[in-house]
Amino acid sequence: MKTDILVVGAGFAGAVVAERLASQLKRKVLIIDKRNHIGGNCYDCYDKFGVLIHKYGAHLFHTDKKEVFDYLSKFTKWHKYEHKVKACLKDVIYDMPINLNTINKFFGRDFDQKECKKYLDEIKVKIKKPKNAEEQVVSQVGWEIYENFFKNYTIKQWEMHPKKLDALVTARVPIRLNTDDRYFDDPYQFMPKKGFTDLFKKILKHKNIDIKLKTDFGKIKEKINYNVLIYTGCIDDFFDKKFGALPYRSLKFKFKNYDQPFYQDYTVINFPNEHKYTKAVEIKHATKQKISKTTVGYEYPSKIGEQYYPVFEPKNEKLYQKYAKEAKKLKNTYFIGRLAEYKYYDMDDVIFSSLNLFKKLKNKI
Ligand code: FAD
Ligand code: UDP
């Protein structure tokens, strides 16, 4: 087998750089993926009831990067959707991220913003530079909110105490003093009108791009010649885990169909303390599909399974750096994306990083 450019992985990292190289530099690209579909973890599909589901958990597009939004807008129309998440504690529903409403409801108060700030100043733990996820939360909202909304959720999600996790993990979720109940602050919050898989089909529809699914790089690497390799799989896999395996966290998804238009009132309900699953996701609120049935996905964190989340512990970052150093030594080989860079990237970060890789490659390959 022979190709000019080989891209491993048909998620956003691979698809975007493949599209740029094919359309702007007129290079021939072969993109392979070990799965039987394109789209990586953003893949969506219709289940047997005809409901559009997100096979790998709720994926909501949000960005503050106009370049990313403009780029994707070449391939899709959008509908406006601002994501909202609720947390359910003993059958009571709270806004998540923590905001003024959450604090008032949880503590049975009626604070305005100023009073709320004063109260938080009293209850928060004075830590200047939080060193881990526990400190990151208690330094903003104190122990009670941490114990009820964050501690058990984090243990369930990561099978690790928040003390052991990097502060970056919980810092993904803001704490607000106003009543803004959107999950993300970004100015661009939309969903692709016909879904993510349709968007990927359009990105990859180019005469210079060939796609081969159900093809694992590890199994064909000796049999394929290429000039340039762009690799978006796990970086430790690429090096046959020679320094040891990088830990990843996985999820198992259980989907349940209901013969009614909607099952729950919100797209995502988090269960920090109850159930083995962390979230119940009714993505139909976000896809806005018109259909009389609905499907809810339940997310069960798991040690085994596909690699979804890099695990943010200092020792893992050190191990990753060893692989990254090896990767830099390779000629015409580039590592990009959530798995190859071992970073907790959202999709817009990945797209941005792919667009930047293309700019770098333009004058180099
Ligand atoms: P992936 O999408 O993982 O794609 C990598 C591809 O490479 C995969 O298809 C894989 O099969 C393939 N591959 C790997 N190894 C090989 C190999 N050896 N040979 C061939 N193919 C290989 N981001 C958001 O912006 N908003 C959200 O709401 C959001 N929700 C998320 C929810 C969950 C549960 C998860 C896990 C992630 C979420 N993300 C979200 C993050 C988002 O999924 C990623 O940022 C994005 O999918 C990363 O794209 P990628 O191309 O780097 O990786
Ligand atoms: N988190 C939590 N309770 C929640 C939501 C989030 O404790 O209700 C913590 C948890 O550690 C989680 C992290 O914040 O892993 C980041 O949350 P986010 O929603 O960004 O996770 P993701 O969307 O990546 O699953």
Image (cartoon, rainbow, N blue to C red):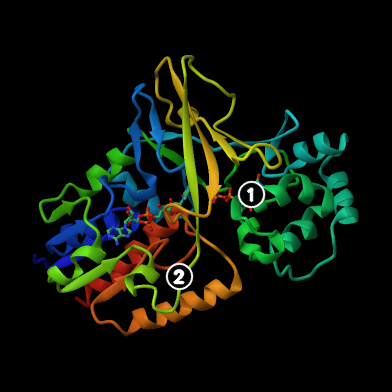
Badge 2 amino acid: Ala
x%, y% of residue 157?
60, 50
| Residue type pointed to by label 1 | Lys
Quadrant containing the C terminus is bottom left
**Label 1 crowd bin: few (<14), some (14–19), many (20+), radius 10 Å:** many
Q: Residue at x 64, y 64 (%)?
A: 165
Disc 2 secondary structure class: loop
Q: Is residue 246 left or right of residue 48?
A: right
**Residue 158 location (% of width, % of height):** 60, 55
- Residue 358 lies left or right of residue 206; in this view the side is right
Q: Whole-percent x and y of residue 203?
A: 24, 48
**x 15%, y 55%: residue:** 209
Number of the label disc, if any, that sits on residue 156? 1
Pointer 2 residue: 245
Query: From this viewpoint, which residue is outermost toward the bottom?
Result: 329
Could you tell me which residue is drawn at 39 percent across and 73 percent down?
241
Q: Quadrant of residue 349?
A: bottom left
